[in-house]
Each structure stands twice: as structure tokens, then as C-alpha cells.
Amino acid sequence: MWQRGAGLGLQDLWERLVGPETSANARVLYLRNGVLALSCSSGGWACELRLKADELVARMNEAGPPEKIRELRLIHHSQKQVKYRK
């Protein structure tokens, strides 16, 4: 089920955990070296996800990804990155 990169398994899990609205505005780019990168449709979505980062990281790790997530990397389409490190 799990694939490196924006594989279907990881994106499907993300959508199940956060719901269709959030997953439509924050798509999985990759999971590599404990970093889950998400492409956000706007700065507002990146900010909202940053505020929920602890909960999101915990929920994703409970679901059993191939490696433990320690950081969310939120990338707005303008290429600005907002990092959250636990």
C-alpha cells in the first residue's frame, strides 16, 4: 500500500484522515526521511495545517506509515515553504 513519493496509498490515507475538503487543498508530495511534504493551495491552508500539525503528525503515525513522520513541510504553490518540526 505504501509507496515513496506521492503514491496512491499515502494520498488515500491522507484523504481518509483529514477529509475531502482538506485533502483537496493539501496534497501529499512525498514522505522521505521522516518529512511529509504537502502542497497547499493557499497560504491560509498552510497556516491552518501548521496549527494542527501536532495532531496531524500523531494521526498519520498511528496509521502506520513506512517511516515515522517527524516533520510536516507545507509548500504553497508559490514555492514558499513553512516547516513544522516536532
Image (tube, rainbow, N blue to C red):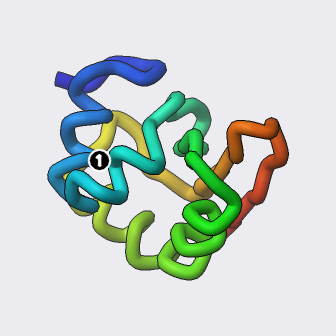
Which residue is at a point 55% across and 43% down the rendered structure image? 38
* Closer to the camera in the image, 29 or 32: 29
Residue 33 position within the rendered picture, expressed as x and y whole percent measured from the top left: 60, 35
Q: Which residue is mark 1?
A: 14
Q: Is residue 27 left or right of residue 18?
A: right
Which residue is at a point 27% across and 61% down the rendered structure image? 18
Q: Is residue 58 left or right of residue 28?
A: left
Residue 86 position within the rendered picture, expressed as x and y whole percent measured from the top left: 63, 71
Which residue is at a point 64% across and 71% down the rendered structure image? 47
Q: Is residue 40 visible?
A: yes
Q: Residues within 10 Å of mark 1 (few under 14, many from 20)?
A: many
Please name the amino acid that badge 1 sits on.
Answer: Trp
Residue 69 position within the rendered picture, expressed as x and y whole percent measured from the top left: 48, 52
* Closer to the camera in the image, 72 or 28: 28
Q: Is residue 63 left or right of residue 83?
A: left
Residue 41 position within the rendered picture, expressed as x and y whole percent measured from the top left: 57, 47
Examine the rendered structure and indicate whether residue 6 appears above or below residue 77: above
Q: Is residue 34 visible?
A: no
Which of the image's four quarters has the N terminus?
top left
Examine the rendered structure and indicate whether residue 7 appears above or below residue 42: above
* Closer to the camera in the image, 18 or 65: 18
Quarter-of-image position of residue 77: top right
